[in-house]
Amino acid sequence: MKATLRSLIVPVLALLASVLPARAGFTLNAISPQSAACIACHKRESPVIYEQWGASQHFRANVGCFECHTANEKDPDAYEHYGQFIATIASPKDCARCHEREVREFNDSHHAKGGRILGSLDNTLAEVVEGNSAFKTSAFPHGVSAAAVSGCWQCHGAEVKVLPNHRLDPATWPNTGIGRINPDGSEGSCTACHSRHTFSSAQARTPDTCGKCHMGPDHPQIEIYNESKHGIAYRANVAKMALDSPKWVVGEDYAAAPTCATCHMSATRDQSVTHDIGMRISWNNRPEISIRPEVADAKLNLPGKDISWEKRRANMVNVCINCHNTNYVGAFYVQYDALIDLYHDKFAKPGLALYKAAKPLLTGPQFANKVDYTWYEIWHHEGRRARHGVSMMGPDYTHWHGTYEVAKHFYSEYIPELRDLAERNLNSTNPDRRQQAEALAKLIEDTLKQDNHKWFLNQMDPAEKTRREQQVKEFQQRYAK
């Protein structure tokens, strides 16, 4: 009987989703008997969950607990609960029964892959440098780092492990990381943005939702947004933002300010909503050296590999021109690209070349040497802050938290540390190390002789030096007391 009821309800949901327009949604005639039974209990036992669901669009469509949590008896995380097989996690695969287009777009995005890129240097830090293997569970008998579990995994998403009793391992659940790998094989967590059980669009449109993960020293988008004129306008005019509007088209339903969703996801008069957050960005500022988004998509074999950065930039311009004219928007992008070029040419490209030349001389694994941290923070923290700062018009993050910190640590820490490393190995009895030290020393000096760095050797072009001295003199005269 249980299998028969499920076999009837789920195909009906899928059929309705397939024949109606992608954004239309649908309404069941009544609450199903299974959901009614869930509600009768949870209204008493979980009143907050019941209240949240009651405020949702799902309630108005008679979509209840069973429609989202129903499971096949053979599903790895299915368990019997008062006569029905259910799963704790309502995954994107479950949501796709009604929201097929949204899930397809999300699956094509970098968000969906967040749980699969946890082999990066960041995780080496959380698992080894910061952490240990003392956190042991049934799924991790050899232990796992609590720093990774409660840090990295909560934003990127864990691979949820199912125990023999069909319950979820506590190292991997609870978890609403954006790229969570679910027991049914799907990737992602819709509740990362649309918190259960209201699944509110208004909440997903607020900047703070994105700021749960997009914050901190290496990707402070929420701090940059708050500093920017966009963020100031939002806070001053939040009552005018119509966040609950079903349509929410910029320029039609609101015009007071943009949020993260406005620029990266939400509808304009010419574009529909997209759940692929990469379709409006023209630089991927995550690596040491920024790359175009189609290059990043190709590395993950995402469909976006075939969509050029020029097309994506045009998509974003289509958002911008709702509030700004084309000259303003075009000039902004000239400024943005110029800052990226500055960071690349002066610091990122030579800095990366120097680090590669230094690696053979370093002892121990990565992060066992001070210079490992110095270079990592130059590009991963300060360099990202500068690039993200300019992309979102946050001047303090572009300069003081960005390029100033990059330059300060490049000249006051990175170069001296590399010089010391080379000098300590120039007289090595190992001919290979001696040769590597000589190559590093030469690269350091060749780098500093470039026009970008001549000032450091007090070799600035005389004409430029004279011009700058005159500017200083004029400034002092202008503001002299």
Image: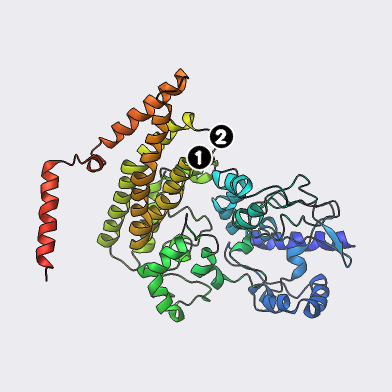
For the residues labelled 1 and 2, the Cα–Cα distance comes to: 8 Å
Q: How many marks?
A: 2
What is the x, y in percent for residue 315? Answer: 40, 56
The answer to whether one can see residue 255 in this image is: no
For image coordinates 75% across by 66% down, the residue present is 67
Q: Secondary structure at mark 2?
A: loop
Q: Residues within 10 Å of mark 1 (few under 14, many from 20)?
A: few
Checking the image for residue 104, the label placed there is none
Q: Secondary structure at mark 1?
A: loop
Picture quadrant of residue 263: bottom left
Q: Are marks 1 and 2 in contact (CB under 8 Å)?
A: yes
What is the x, y in percent for residue 437? Answer: 40, 26
Horizontal side of 26 relative to 242 (left or right) equals right
What is the x, y in percent for residue 262? Answer: 45, 66
Residue under numbered circle 1: 369
Name the residue nearer the viewer: 25 or 328. Answer: 328
Residue type of the residue flagged with mark 2: Gly
What is the x, y in percent for residue 468? Answer: 14, 51
Residue type of the residue flagged with mark 1: Asn
For image coordinates 43% across by 55% down, the residue present is 280
For image coordinates 11% across by 50% down, the residue present is 467
Which numbered disc flags the more N-terminal residue, 1 or 2? 2
Q: Residues within 10 Å of mark 2 (few under 14, many from 20)?
A: few
For image coordinates 79% across by 58% down, the residue present is 71
In which quadrant of the rendered image does the N terminus lie? bottom right
Q: Is residue 386 above or below residue 477?
A: above
Picture quadrant of residue 268: bottom left
The answer to whether one can see residue 163 in this image is: yes
Checking the image for residue 364, the label placed there is 2
